[in-house]
Image (spheres, rainbow, N blue to C red):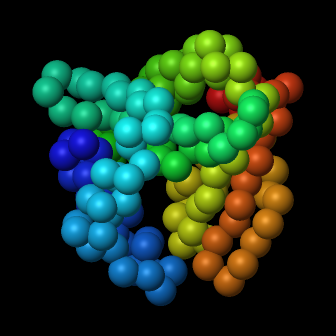
Amino acid sequence: MQEILALDRLTLTAHTRAAGDEFTTEIHHAALVAILPKSKIIKIHRGALLAGYAYLWPKEDGLWHMGGFGIHPDFRFVRVIKQLLAEIKVLVRQEGITELQSHVYKTNLRSLALHRRLGFKVIDENEKGFAFSLKQMNISFPGL
């Protein structure tokens, strides 16, 4: 959990604050403690460093939420992203996932671009962010 927390602190702080929310290690740690035990976690390492991760949890039959998806700034290469997405596709098949949902701050431009490139569709919006959905036929991530 500590390596996810460290990567999130590195990658989420600026755009979270830009969206008008506060990112604190204590609050984020508590959120991870609550959600990770019910999540499936995928990690990609390069040596001892966490290059990327994703964690997903079931909301209801076939519908899962991707609560975290992070790539270390030093490893934002197609190869790392493709490896992470390939492992997500394996999880999708294993768990019978038919829909993935995700939330993204409007200030997180990289994540917004990736979601759109992967075929996620906006299903809701508020002043701070978007709720996205990706249905089964697109979980093959055709945009990458």
- The number of numbered discs placed on residues in the rendered structure image is 0
Where does residue 133 sit, x and y in percent of width and height?
A: 76, 47
Q: Is residue 19 shown left or right of residue 70?
A: right
Judged from this view, the residue extending furthest toward the left is 48
Query: In the picture, which quadrant includes the C terminus?
Result: top right
Residue at position x 46%, y 38% in the image: 38
Give above or below for 64 relative to 45: below
The residue lying at 72 percent from left, 40 percent from top is 60
Q: Which residue is drawn at 38% across and 53% down?
A: 34
Q: In this view, does 14 lie above or below 36?
A: below
Q: In this view, does 81 lie above or below 31?
A: above
Camera-side residue of 66 and 18 = 66
Q: Position of residue 31 (x, y in %)?
A: 37, 59
Q: Is residue 63 above or below residue 137?
A: below
Residue 143 in view here: yes
- Image location (x, y in percent) of residue 80: 42, 27
Q: Which residue is painted at 43% across and 49% down in the image?
A: 35
- Which quarter shows the N terminus? top left
- The percent coordinates of residue 135 (x first, y second) are 82, 36
| The one of 56 and 72 positioned closer to us in this rendering | 56
- On the question of residue 117 being in view, the answer is no
Front in this rendered view, residue 89 or 142: 89
